[in-house]
Amino acid sequence: MQTKNFASWPIVLVLTAISLPLAIMYASLVIDSFTNTPAGAVLPNEFTLEHWAFLVDPTITGNVWTVTFNTLIFAFTMVVVVLSVSATGGYAMSRLNLPYRRFFLAGILVMHAFPSVTLIIGVFLVLQFAGLYDTLIGVILVKAALTLPFGVWIMKGFYDAVPWEIEMAGLQDGADRFTVWRRLILPQVKPGLVALGVFAFIDGWGEFLLPRILAPTTEFQVLSVYLNNVSVPDSVDYDFNLFKSVGLFYTLPILILFIVFQNRLMNIFGGGTKG
C-alpha cells in the first residue's frame, strides 16, 4: 500500500503543477472583480462592489438580465431538442436494421467534422429564405442541427451497451417496441441522457459565433456576445475589473453545473449503462 501511494506522488505533482496556474488565474479573477486593483498590479486594493453594479444598472453595459434570459432559453431549448432527437435517433441507429445504416453513420461523423464557420454562408441564406434570420429560434435550430450528429453517435454507444435480452424479454411478454424502449431501454441509458443534456446546455451556453453572425440585433443577444462587447475597450480608462466581473458572472452557472454533474458528464466519453 505504501509503495502504491509513493508511486502516485509524481502524478499528483504533475497535476498540481498543471492546475496551479489555472487556480491562480481564477483566484485573480475573483479578487479583481471585488477590488479596485489596477491593471498589472500584484496586490489587491480596497474591497468594492462597484464592478458588480451592471447587475442593477442597465446603463453600464446594457440589461444583463434580458441577455441572461435569452441565453437560458437558448441553452435549455438545446437540451430539449438534442435529447429528444438523440434518444430516438441513437436507438434507431443501434437497434433497427435500417437500409444504408452504415452510410448514414458515416455521414453523421462527416457532418460533425465540419466546423460551423464553413457553413455560415449557406446557413445564412437558408435562414433568410425561411424568415428566421436575426431570430433566436433560427440560431437555436442551426446550433441544434450541428450538435445532433454528436448526440446521436453518443447515444448509439450507450444503447449498444444495453443487452439485447432485456429488449427481447419485453417483446416476448407482448409489449410493443415503443413501450419496450420507453420502459425498459430508456432507463438503462439514463446516465448517457444526463451527460448529453449537461453537454448540450454547456454547448448552448457558450456558443458565440452563431448568435453573433445570425442574430446580430441587441434584442436577441446572448451572454457570450454581451461579454465580447464589454471586452472591447472604447477609451483609455477601460475598466478591466468590470470585464472580469461580467466574465465571472458568465462562467459561474457552468462552473456550478459541472461541479454538480461532473461524474455523469464523464460518462459521455465512454458510453455505458452504469451511473
Image: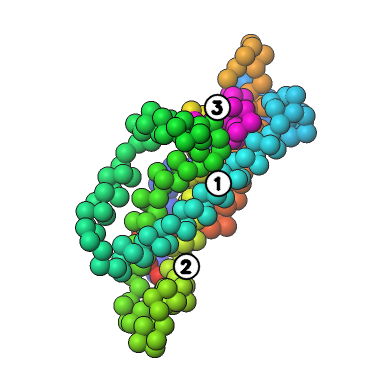
Q: CA distance from mark 3 to mark 1?
A: 18 Å
Relative image position of residue 258 (x, y in whole percent) = 54, 52
**Nearer the observer, 66 or 137:** 137
Nearer the observer: mark 2 or 3; the answer is 3
Count of numbered tags: 3
Give the residue drawn at x 35%, y 73%.
162
Res 83 seen here: yes
Q: Which residues are magenta?
A: 214-231
User: Quick check: is 221 in the magenta stretch?
Assistant: yes
For badge 2, the amino acid type reads Lys
Three-letter code for the amino acid on which mark 3 is drawn? Pro
For label 2, the residue is: 190
Say which label, 3 or 1, has the lower sequence index: 1
Report the predominant secondary structure element of the magenta stretch: helix
Location of residue 105 by image quarter: bottom left
Q: Earlier in the sequence, mark 2 or mark 3?
A: 2
Mark 2 to mark 3 CA distance (whole Å) = 37 Å
Q: Which residue is mark 1?
A: 75
Badges 2 and 3: C-beta atoms under 8 Å apart?
Answer: no
Q: Which mark is residue 97?
A: none
Residue 156 or residue 10, whichever sits in front: 156
Is 68 placed left or right of 175 in the picture?
A: right
| Cα–Cα span, label 2 and label 1 | 20 Å
Q: Which sits earlier in the primary sequence, circle 2 or circle 1?
A: 1
Residue 216 tag number:
3
